């Protein structure tokens, strides 16, 4: 897509910075590592993870009751969200096992035989790029402009040998980041080779990655260089790295460590390669390492610099600005004035969850631009299907469906309030927090608990925790 020099509203004020959470402190108050304090930097929008695995942000290897990747802390406007990541022995807040709970500063929670306390959360001011794009990756929200500043600094490093691991959901633009880093490096005039590991046939994986010599396959070319040789002096982008077969991983590791390739069926001939490797995945490599499905030594070898891409649903009004940009590009390609989105269509774009992210948005907008007869695009022209809000609100309520309407309402309300109380816990101020999450005032929330017969038990639990 061609560069678009149309001024953009979100970056009109230039660079600067914005404030966000930058670091937390966890103290081990009980367990094998009692007294230890761990300070963990918080990356943009990323959770921190704890467990026995060396890939975790908080490594608790001395407690054999803790799983490899046991828990995570994700920081949201409502507070710190503590989640059990499918551990064997669970996560406990006030001795209540939780799958997910909002916790505050000084909250103590238990994993295995270890009790941890969230003791500090420090905010930092992070710089923002004055630009609205990096290469062909566009964005206007603070999260993307922070990302662009980070990418600009990586691209400006004197050596382009730094390995980069890009993570993010499908369609967030991982290849665009890799291409942008290559184009700004001293390797820009050399090859940029892409290998999608998810499309490589298992039986041919070694030959494709490392190449093969004469006589390797019947009816095949006499010899074929692998992707490392093809990318010599340039950049190799390994997309969907998590799909790489486990038995090929040690051979990839040797190439990364030594800069040497031995082709399939050429065991005694070594070829030197000079390649910058950029990897990407939408898989959870930390969990894969913990499960034995990805080698830890390879994980740390490719992890040089981590770039995490936000999903489109986390980017606020970017979805509308990107849609407008795609419409302008379509108008230019067709030689016609760009079509306009109605206010309702813009609201629908903001409300959608976009599991395919920017790639899905681009396809939706291009289809609407070509198939809509008039100059404007309305909600029905986007073909988004049922609203995402409606999908999120659907319940697996089969037990309730056999009840009378009034009984089903009461049953749902009881389950809703019990789940809400489990989520917030019963520390001081829990009623106010729960009422806020439910969109109710305090008095209405308390009345609802009393009407449903939940108030007395809730207050007894709160007294026990006091």
Image (cartoon, rainbow, N blue to C red):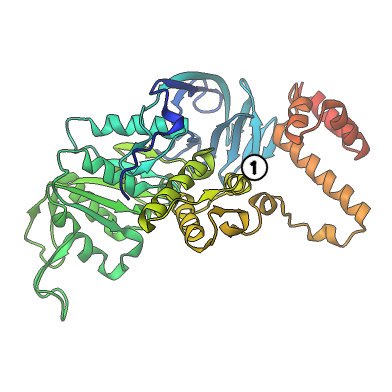
Residue at image position (77%, 25%) is 432
Marks counted in the figure total 1
Query: Which residue occupies the foreground of this view, 96 or 320?
Result: 320
Relative depth, front residue between 7 and 160 = 7
- Residue 57 position (above or below residue 88): above
Residue 302 % position (x, y) = 29, 43
Report the residue at 33% width, 44% height from top.
136
> Is residue 51 left or right of 201 when viewed as pictured?
right
**Which quadrant of the rendered structure holds the C terminus?**
top right
Q: Secondary structure at mark 1?
A: loop
Disc 1 target residue: 99
x then y, percent, for residue 447: 90, 32
Residue for point 29% across, 52% down: 238
* Label 1: few (<14), some (14–19) or many (≥20) C-alpha neighbours in 10 Å: some
Kindly tell me whether residue 243 is visible in this rendering: yes
**x, y percent for residue 391:** 67, 54
In this orientation, which residue lies closer to the viewer: 189 or 397?
189
Query: Which residue is depicted at the point 57% across and 49% down?
Result: 353
Residue 57 visible within the image: no
Decide if residue 9 is on the left or right side of residue 245.
right
Where's residue 181, x and y in %?
26, 40
> In the image shown, does 375 or 287 lie closer to the viewer?
375
Q: Is residue 264 above or below residue 461?
A: below
The residue furthest bottom is 219
Residue 44: which quarter of the image? top left
Is 228 located above or below residue 74 in the figure?
Answer: below
Q: Is residue 274 found left or right of 104 in the rendered image? A: left
């Amino acid at each position: 897509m061609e560069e678009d020099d149309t001024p953009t509203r979100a970056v009109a004020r230039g660079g600067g910075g914005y404030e966000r959470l930058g670091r937390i402190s966890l103290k081990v108050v009980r367990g094998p590592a009692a007294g230890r304090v761990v300070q963990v930097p918080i990356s943009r929008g990323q959770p921190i993870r704890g467990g026995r695995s060396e890939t975790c942000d908080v490594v608790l290897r001395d407690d054999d009751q803790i799983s490899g990747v046991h828990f995570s802390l994700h920081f949201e406007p409502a507070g710190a969200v503590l989640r059990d990541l499918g551990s064997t022995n669970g996560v406990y807040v006030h001795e209540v096992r939780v799958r997910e709970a909002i916790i505050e500063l000084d909250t103590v929670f238990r994993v295995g035989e270890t009790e941890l306390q969230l003791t500090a959360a420090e905010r930092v001011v992070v710089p923002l790029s004055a630009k609205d794009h990096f290469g062909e990756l566009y964005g206007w929200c603070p999260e993307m402009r922070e990302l662009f500043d980070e990418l600009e600094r990586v691209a400006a490093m004197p050596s382009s040998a730094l390995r980069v691991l890009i993570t993010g959901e499908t369609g967030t633009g991982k290849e665009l980041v890799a291409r942008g880093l290559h184009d700004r490096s001293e390797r820009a005039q050399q090859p940029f080779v892409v290998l999608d590991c998810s499309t490589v046939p298992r039986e041919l994986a070694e030959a494709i990655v490392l190449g093969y010599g004469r006589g390797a396959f019947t009816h095949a070319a006499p010899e074929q260089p692998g992707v490392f040789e093809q990318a010599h002096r340039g950049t190799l982008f390994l997309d969907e790295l998590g799909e790489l077969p486990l038995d090929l991983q040690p051979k990839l590791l040797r190439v990364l460590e030594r800069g040497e390739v031995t082709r399939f069926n050429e065991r005694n001939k070594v070829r030197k390669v000079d390649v910058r490797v950029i990897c990407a995945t939408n898989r959870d490599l930390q969990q894969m390492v913990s499960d034995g499905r990805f080698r830890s030594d390879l994980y740390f070898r490719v992890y040089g610099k981590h770039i995490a891409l936000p999903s489109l649903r986390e980017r606020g009004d970017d979805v509308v600005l990107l849609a407008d940009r795609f419409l302008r590009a379509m108008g230019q390609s067709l030689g016609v004035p760009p079509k306009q989105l109605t206010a309702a269509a813009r609201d629908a774009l903001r409300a959608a969850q976009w599991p395919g992210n920017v790639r899905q948005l681009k396809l939706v907008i291009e289809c609407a631009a070509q198939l809509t007869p008039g100059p404007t695009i309305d909600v029905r022209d986007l073909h988004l299907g049922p609203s995402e809000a409606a999908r999120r609100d659907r319940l697996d309520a089969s037990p309730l469906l056999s009840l009378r309407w009034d009984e089903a309402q009461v049953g749902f309300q009881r389950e809703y309030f019990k789940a809400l109380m489990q989520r917030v816990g019963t520390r001081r101020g829990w009623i106010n927090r729960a009422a806020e999450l439910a969109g109710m005032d305090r008095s209405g929330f308390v009345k609802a608990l009393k009407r449903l017969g939940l108030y007395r038990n809730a207050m007894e639990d709160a007294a026990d925790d006091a």
